Image (tube, rainbow, N blue to C red):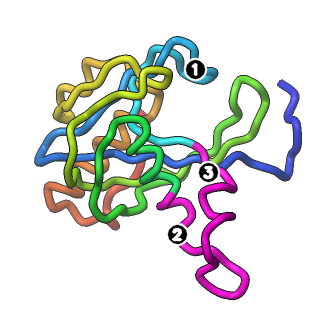
Amino acid sequence: MEIKNRELHRITSTAIIYKKDKYLLLKRSLNKKAFPGQWTVPGGGLEVDDYLNIPKTTKDHWYFAIEKSLRREIKEECNLEVGKMKYLVDIAFIRPDGIPTIILSFYTPFKSGEVKLEEEENTDYAWVSYEEAKEYDLVEGLLEEIEMVDKILKGKNEDDIEYKNE
């Protein structure tokens, strides 16, 4: 596979949204470049418009660009508002079109709204427990991320939780 530029990466983020012991899954549209038809969580890419047209936080920087873009993606993809976002894990990935991508995975509580899908992006949704998530055709690695969040929410020490792909 040809890597288009070895120094540049597309930055994306995802959110494992939880409501009590349930997690929101979205089924990707069949026209998606990566993982068509598989189940995932809301997320998407950082765009310069997510920060370029708003005032800088400092003289030179925009803080919270990833968080703002992820909140935008959640609103666009499933019409939900979420609470405080917490970092979970990062993933490096080469898309099928050769673009290196960094995915920052967060988890966040559901705050408000009713799921309304952006149809070009996703075709179905489900609120499922960790055990129920095992029955879905998830994007590789997502089940392990949900397991990590499930353990955190059940009071396991975050320092003791590691990503395990068995």
Q: CA distance from mark 2 to mark 3?
A: 11 Å
Residue 140, position as x, y percentages in the image = 47, 28
> In the structure shown, which secondary structural element does the residue marked by tag 2 occupy?
loop
Question: Which one is in front, 156 or 142?
Answer: 142
Q: Residue 46, labelled with which disc?
A: 3
Circles 1 and 3, Cβ within 8 Å, touching? The answer is no
Q: CA distance from mark 1 to mark 2?
A: 27 Å
Residue 25, position as x, y percentages in the image = 31, 31
Q: CA distance from mark 1 to mark 3?
A: 17 Å
- Span highlighted in magenta in the image: 45-68
Name the residue: 18% across, 30% down. 131
> In the structure shown, which secondary structural element does the residue marked by tag 1 occupy?
loop
> Viewed as shown, does residue 136 lie left or right of 110?
right
Name the residue: 57% across, 14% down. 31
> Viewed as shown, does residue 13 lie left or right of 3?
left
- Report the predominant secondary structure element of the magenta stretch: loop
Residue 28 in the image: above or below residue 155: above
Residue under circle 2?
64
Residue 95 in the image: above or below residue 101: above
Name the residue: 18% across, 26% down. 132
- Say which label, 1 or 3, has the lower sequence index: 1
Residue 50, position as x, y percentages in the image = 60, 57
